[in-house]
Image (cartoon, rainbow, N blue to C red):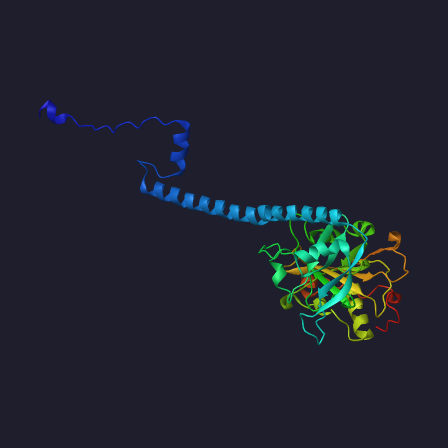
Amino acid sequence: MSENNNKKTVRLRPKRKKMNAFESFISDIIPWKGDSTGEVVRKIVFLVGIIGLVTAGIIMLNFYVFRDNRNSEDAQYWADQKEQNATDDVITVILKDKDKNSSESAESEKEVEVLAEYMTYYEQNEDFVGWISMYPYIDYPVVQAQDNEYYLKHNFNKGYNENGTIFADYQGVINANEMPHNTLLYGHNLITNNFFQPLSNYRKQGIEFLKNNYMLNFDTLYERNQYKIFSVFLTNTKTEHGEVFDYWSKVYFESKTDFDNFVAECLDRSYFYTGVDLQYGDELLTLSTCDFSMFSDMRLVVIARKVRENETLSMDPSTFIDNTGFDENGNVKRKMFDAYYTTYGCEWAGRKWDPSYIKDFAG
């Protein structure tokens, strides 16, 4: 056998061009010339995952940061506007009659006295009915529509905005001569501490926050009003979680018994007892916002009683009673609902507040 027949032919692959650091990084994450089929598939799957994460991040960033930052600017705007318009003047103007129970035309007009500083907001939006404040945390105009849906996703100027604005329950008549028995105000709980998010401090910081923030102000277009908080509670809205306390249905009370039973239920559920006395005929103010701290779609509710004529505004925070947590038997002090009892393996400890809080209470 000849020598030539014993030689093997060896074919060498051309050498790859040496990559710089950037090219090396890119070739590790995207399909590159010379990659095997498996390597190409791996890189494609990786890239799809990265694109999905980036997209989700942008959506979340817009929802929780950029969207709410726009609202932060609005909050400062309203605070500045109120300061600029502040005055104690009362003026007489002609306004549309907003009495929903009136037999007259909805477009009829009446001459009424209004607080001059609030006319600016009424002129911007005739749905304006008042101003809610809990200094320095809450300071906003309040509107009222023909339903409880519109202002969930519209701002004060009626532009579409998922932050919405604070609004009064449509069922209550708010005018120069009349107020609901219980004025319900709704506001979103926003991550940037806007609208009714500060109400969460009653739950998070507890009785110490309440001791410094036990008053609410709700001025209407027609008069200034102050309220003393008597109940703060968290409640369920889904029947699958158990009992639903439909506090939102009580804009008007049919009788003393109806009133007494309602405020008793509020006290049963309250984190605290402030000792505010209550009687049929008192005007109530309810602030309601969403809460997701425990179960989905819950409501954090703060309820206050209007300061009566010639009544002192001061209260003694040292007399406030903390009703949070569990008793010595492991039962929760405030009234909750089935899903809570099941989760924490407890029951409601039962009614403990002083019946004298409610005048002539027979419950």
> Is 6 situated left or right of 313 in this image?
left
Residue 112 in view of the camera: yes
> Is 247 situated left or right of 316 in this image?
left
Residue at image point 64% right, 46% down: 73
Residue 141's spot in the image, x, y percent?
A: 70, 55
Hey, which quadrant is residue 276 in on the image? bottom right
Q: Residue furthest left?
A: 1
Residue 192's spot in the image, x, y percent?
A: 65, 47
Hey, which quadrant is residue 118 in on the image? bottom right
Residue 261's spot in the image, x, y percent?
A: 79, 71
Q: Is residue 237 above or below residue 30?
A: below
Quarter of the picture containing the N terminus is: top left
Q: Is residue 151 above or below residue 69?
A: below
Residue at image point 67% right, 67% down: 242
> Is 290 situated left or right of 2 in this image?
right
Quarter of the picture containing the C terminus is: bottom right
Residue 347 in view of the camera: no
In front of the other: 171 or 61: 171
